[in-house]
Amino acid sequence: MKRMIKRFGKLTTASFIIMGIGVVTFLLTPVFLLIGADTDLLGILILDIGVVIYIIELIRRKKPNRLKLVALFVLISVLGIPILFSIISLIYYLITGKLLEI
């Protein structure tokens, strides 16, 4: 593990681990459905967080030119929408006790 952190960096390694947890959670959805837990959206959300962290590390490490930087910021913004919505719905649920309906 130390070699991997030394080779890729802490943030990249953490993002790959988070993406792996998201993929495993998504793929184990049929098993979790047997016990009554629906984890497909949770797995995709965890994978999305890992991808956003990886793109941030890519921007920090590679220093892309202006056009690529704008494209990566737009990609982060689009990928951040489900994360923001889940945070808002969690806060709403904790305050009111009801699920947020669209």
Image (spheres, grey):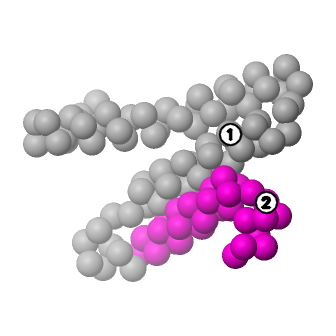
Which of the marked residues, 2 or 1, is nearer the chain's N terminus?
2
- Residue at 86% from the left image edge and 31% from the top image edge: 64
Whether residue 87 is in magenta: the answer is no
Provide residue 52's location: percent of width, then percent of height: 62, 43
Q: Main secondary structure of the magenta part?
A: helix
Provide residue 11's location: percent of width, then percent of height: 66, 53
Provide residue 4's location: percent of width, then percent of height: 76, 70
For label 2, the SS is helix
Neighbourhood count class around disc 1 (C-alpha, 10 Å): few under 14, some 14–19, many 20 upward:
some
The residue under label 2 is which amino acid type? Phe
Whether residue 23 is in magenta: the answer is yes
- Residue at 76% from the left image edge and 22% from the top image edge: 70
Provide residue 39's location: percent of width, then percent of height: 38, 63
> In the displayed structure, would residue 93 be above or below residue 45?
above
In the picture, measured across the screen, residue 44 lies left or right of residue 3, that is left
- Residue at 79% from the left image edge and 26% from the top image edge: 69
For label 1, the SS is helix
For the residues carrying marks 2 and 1, which lies nearer the camera in this image? 2
- Residue placed under numbered mark 1 in the picture: 56
> In the displayed structure, would residue 25 be above or below residue 52?
below
> In the displayed structure, would residue 94 be above or below residue 42?
above
- Residue at 48% from the left image edge and 51% from the top image edge: 45
In the picture, measured across the screen, residue 31 lies left or right of residue 91, that is right
- Residue placed under numbered mark 2 in the picture: 8
> In the displayed structure, would residue 61 be above or below residue 27?
above
Q: Which residues are magenta?
A: 1-30
